[in-house]
Amino acid sequence: QVQLVESGGGSVQAGGSLRLSCAADLYTNQFEIMGWFRQAPGKEREGVAAIYVRSGTTYYADSVKDRFTISQGNARNTVYLQMDSLKPEDTAMYYCAADFGYGGTWGSLSRYNYWGQGTQVTVSS
């Protein structure tokens, strides 16, 4: 079973930047979609950004547009999330997600069958 491994989380002051990375731990077919979700304490997990691998089409939550950028790595099944102008409300556990299938809504949890363990992002004011 393919696992997704995230890295790059940490603590930063408001206005700062972090870059999250995600990679599959085994060589496998190319995912159709890769995305990032986040979950703050007491809140539901929400979609942050996603990229359709073949077309390069990207999607963002309104709350992160113009601040976050999702991109593919050169290696198969790798994805990055560049987070700039971070705000305290961006504090959450960030999860990488991916799937081989077509269809579905990019921000829907059920769209993805593969998940990472999460990496914590903390933004202080």
Image (cartoon, rainbow, N blue to C red):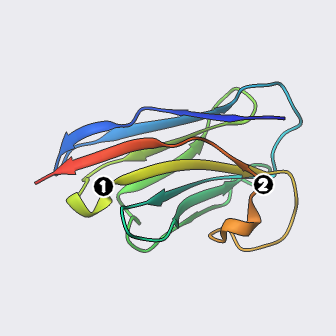
Q: Which mark is residue 13?
A: none
Q: Classify 27 as above or below 116.
A: above
Residue 122 in the image, given as x and y percentages of width and height:
27, 47
7 relative to 40 in the view: left or right: right
Q: Nearer the viewer, residue 99 or 110?
A: 110
Residue 79 in the image, given as x and y percentages of width and height:
61, 40
Q: Residue at x 75, y 65 (%)?
A: 111
Q: Mark 1 is on which residue type?
A: Thr
Which residue in the rendered view is the most extreme toward the left? 125
Indicate the secondary structure of the residue bearing disc 1: loop
28 relative to 112 in the view: left or right: right
Image quarter of the N terminus: top right
Indicate the secondary structure of the residue bearing disc 2: loop
Q: Mark 2 is on which residue type?
A: Asn
Q: Which mark is residue 91?
A: 1
Q: Which mark is residue 113?
A: 2
Q: Residue at x 51, y 43 (%)?
A: 118
User: How far is mark 2 from mark 1, CA to CA?
Assistant: 24 Å
1 relative to 67 in the view: left or right: right
